[in-house]
Image (tube, grey):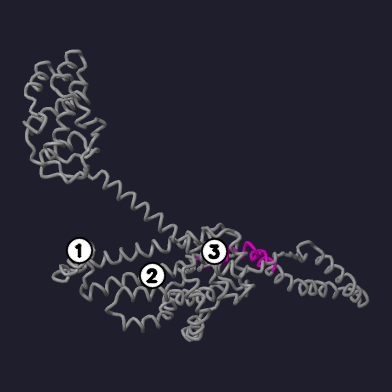
């Protein structure tokens, strides 16, 4: 590895600065990386010719083959960083190795690993295997793998979002009969009926997802490579090593300069003095210069703890399963969140219903408590009107009006055939009565208005108005009007 030929500044960075470095490397050689990526996808393209009528299997095949494209992009990206410009012939020579190298592990066991952008440079660029590979990866992850896991989540979400954005943009350019056919197919799909749509729709949809997966994977490889470079810079001091190598290059020319100066000085003195200066003073000067602290060779020793007998299984298998388990847990949390939102919408569905008329949907079993008021028949007195008048004359206006309203709600539930939910408001109850076509709508509407003014505005109606409500009370036991 020729650090002195590197074409980017190697210095210790924060995690997200390292991600920015990787993204910048991808932008610098984007078209070359794009060509290398699609070169690796040629086997998938060949198989795609037999799956043109099965878009789902086609997308699944391309998604599964993405690590091959990632390898080819990483090879070109790493060589470009160290000053090499690979030609098409060089990439073709690397192509077979990118297809088959560690195929069972990378394409099967580690296919869902969130750490793939960081661990892939270890096996591809360093060529490590077995215990050496595990030790290297363990050291790289010691600084914290949170950034790589966040990148994995970003990769999944961005790929899906970008595919929908590209597909939505394509829809803007479709007109005429084709547009109507596409929209009809999409409407069937939205309703859960997966009918076979036109081939042009499948082609655009698959192309949108392929473009999205390609772009996201290229920049994901660059981001992982940037994190890998940063970790090695922190651990191995690449920036320090580069500084020493530059200093060594300057030191190589120092003896020549000193010798030339000594030779120029010696030309003006006798031969004996020249020999003395050449052998004695020049040597002492050079030794004095080399004794300076800038030329001290520093050595560091790292002690790597011995791995336990079960470490092979722990990292290769447990690590991958932990990543898979994390994805499953995140999926379950998202599903639970969506389920909670759906339940809240269903629980409060009355809020979204049309209150201007028409039947308001079924409310389930008969309610016993509405807006905190007990509407069971046994909770009401036998003569509701007499009891309400008694409360009114005692000055308990709120209780009297509440009793009339409770009695009306109870009658509507028990005898009017109105399905009222416990969570319904006064307006919901009025809408349900109107929608069910129950009797005494005018009286119930006036009673609801008076009750809401008492309950919320604290406006007590006149005695004549309340007595008029009692005289016109239409609800009697047994369902009579």
Q: Is 140 left, or right, of 345 in this rendering?
A: right
Give the residue at x 79% y 74%.
260
Can residue 478 be found in the magenta stretch? no
Give the residue at x 19% y 23%.
454
Q: Residues within 10 Å of mark 1 (few under 14, many from 20)?
A: few
Foreground tag (1 vs 3): 1
Image height of 473 relative to 344, above or below: above
Q: Quadrant of residue 279?
A: bottom right
Residue 187 — which label? 1
**Would you name the residue on which mark 2 appears?**
213
Q: CA distance from mark 2 to mark 1?
A: 25 Å
Q: CA distance from mark 2 to mark 3?
A: 21 Å
Q: Earlier in the sequence, mark 2 or mark 3?
A: 2
**Would you name the residue on which mark 3 appears?**
227
Q: Residues within 10 Å of mark 3 (few under 14, many from 20)?
A: many
**Horizontal and vertical percent position of residue 155:** 42, 64
Helix, strand or loop at mark 2: helix
Q: Earlier in the sequence, mark 1 or mark 3?
A: 1
Q: Quadrant of the N terminus?
A: bottom right
């Amino acid at each position: 590895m020729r650090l002195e030929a590197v074409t980017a500044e190697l210095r210790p960075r924060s995690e997200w600065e390292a991600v920015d470095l990787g993204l910048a490397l991808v932008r610098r050689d984007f078209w070359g990386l794009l060509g290398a990526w699609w070169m690796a996808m040629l086997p998938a393209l060949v198989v795609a010719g037999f799956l043109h009528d099965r878009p789902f299997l086609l997308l699944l095949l391309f998604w599964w083959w993405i690590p091959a494209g990632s390898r080819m992009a990483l090879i070109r990206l790493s060589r470009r960083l160290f000053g090499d410009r690979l030609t098409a012939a060089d990439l073709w020579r690397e192509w077979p190795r990118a297809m088959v190298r560690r195929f069972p592990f990378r394409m099967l066991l580690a296919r869902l690993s969130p750490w793939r952008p960081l661990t892939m440079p270890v096996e591809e660029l360093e060529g490590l295997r077995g215990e050496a590979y595990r030790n290297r990866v363990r050291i790289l992850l010691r600084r914290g793998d949170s950034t790589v896991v966040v990148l994995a989540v970003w990769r999944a979400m961005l790929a899906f979002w970008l595919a929908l954005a590209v597909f939505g943009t394509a829809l803007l350019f479709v007109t005429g009969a084709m547009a109507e056919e596409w929209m009809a197919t999409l409407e069937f799909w939205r309703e859960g009926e997966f009918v076979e749509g036109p081939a042009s729709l499948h082609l655009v949809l698959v192309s949108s997802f392929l473009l999205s997966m390609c772009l996201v994977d290229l920049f994901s490889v660059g981001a992982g490579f940037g994190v890998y470079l940063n970790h090695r810079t922190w651990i191995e001091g690449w920036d320090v090593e580069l500084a020493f190598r530059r200093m060594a290059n300057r030191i190589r020319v120092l003896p020549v300069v000193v010798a030339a100066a000594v030779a120029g000085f010696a030309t003006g003195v006798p031969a004996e003095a020249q020999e003395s200066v050449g052998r004695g003073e020049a040597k002492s000067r050079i030794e004095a210069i080399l004794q300076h602290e800038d030329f001290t060779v520093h050595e560091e020793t790292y002690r790597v703890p011995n791995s336990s007998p079960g470490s092979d299984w722990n990292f290769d298998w447990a690590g991958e399963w932990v990543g898979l388990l994390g994805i499953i847990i995140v999926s379950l949390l998202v599903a639970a969140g969506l389920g909670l939102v759906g339940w809240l919408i269903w629980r409060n569905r009355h809020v979204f219903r049309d209150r201007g008329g028409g039947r308001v949907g079924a409310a389930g079993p008969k309610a016993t408590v509405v807006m905190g008021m007990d509407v069971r028949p046994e909770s009401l007195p036998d003569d509701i009107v007499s009891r309400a008048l008694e409360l009114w004359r005692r000055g308990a206006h709120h209780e009297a009006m509440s009793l009339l309203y409770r009695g009306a709600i109870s009658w509507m539930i028990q005898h009017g055939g109105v399905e009222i939910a416990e969570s319904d408001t006064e307006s919901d109850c009025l809408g349900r009565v109107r929608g069910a076509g129950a009797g005494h709508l005018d009286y119930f509407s006036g009673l609801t208005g008076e009750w809401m003014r008492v309950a919320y505005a604290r406006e007590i109606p006149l005695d004549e108005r309340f007595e008029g409500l009692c005289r016109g009370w239409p609800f009697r036991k047994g369902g009579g009007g």
